[in-house]
Image (cartoon, rainbow, N blue to C red):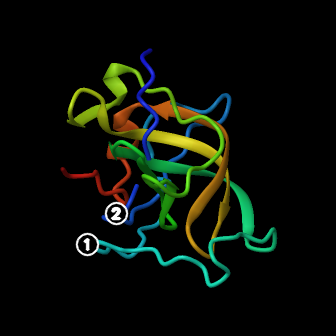
Amino acid sequence: MRRKPVALVLGALIASTACSAPAEGESGAPQPVSQPAPASASPTTSPPANGGETSDATASSATRCGWFENPTPGNAWLSDRDRTWIVGTQGGHQADGDWPAFGDDQWIVTNGSSYGYGCACMSVRADADNGHVLRIDDARALPLSRCRADPALEEPRF
């Protein structure tokens, strides 16, 4: 597997929903696993009133699954059933931890030789107030078919 360059998201965020990997002993067949989230052509994120600092009271841990997008250097996000979670922005916020390692058959190149998107699950600590992923504890790539099979997930378009 070839690791994609670290690069993370700015603006054009796509709201969608989660998919989840099967638990041990479950079938690996694609199954819808989420409820649709309201769609928006280009949602934006405002910085929190406290100047960007995150209190522990607003941070939560969860496994988030959906489309992981890395369209340009320094920009990345994950769109799951709840919202679009910002992993990083060029010259700004960057989550701690490692991104999913995508194989060539798990990654759609949309820009240059390595920028694009794939389907992933990530165990993260995130700030629900501003939508920032603060830390990635675990991340794994899933087959593209997993997210495509979930009718609540809208595949990114570039």
Percent coordinates x, y for residue 60 in the rendering: 74, 63
Residue furthest toward the top?
Answer: 1
Q: Quadrant of residue 115?
A: top left
The answer to whether 2 is drawn above or below residue 150 in the figure is above
The reply to whether dot 2 and dot 1 touch (C-beta < 8 Å) is: no
Percent coordinates x, y for residue 106 in the rendering: 36, 28
Classed neighbour count for the residue bearing mark 2: other residues with Cα under 10 Å, few (<14), some (14–19), many (≥20): many
Question: At 42% across and 30% down in the image, what residue appears?
Answer: 5
Give the spatial CA distance, label 2 vs label 1: 7 Å
Classed neighbour count for the residue bearing mark 1: other residues with Cα under 10 Å, few (<14), some (14–19), many (≥20): few
Quadrant location of the N terminus? top left
Residue 17 appears in view: yes
Percent coordinates x, y for residue 113 in the rendering: 24, 26
Question: At 38% across and 51% down in the image, what residue appears?
Answer: 150
Disc with the residue nearer the chain's start (2 vs 1): 2
Label 2's element?
A: loop
Q: Which residue is mark 1?
A: 41
Percent coordinates x, y for residue 136 in the rendering: 65, 44
Residue 34 appears in view: no
Q: Which residue is mark 2?
A: 14
Q: Amino acid at mark 2?
A: Ile
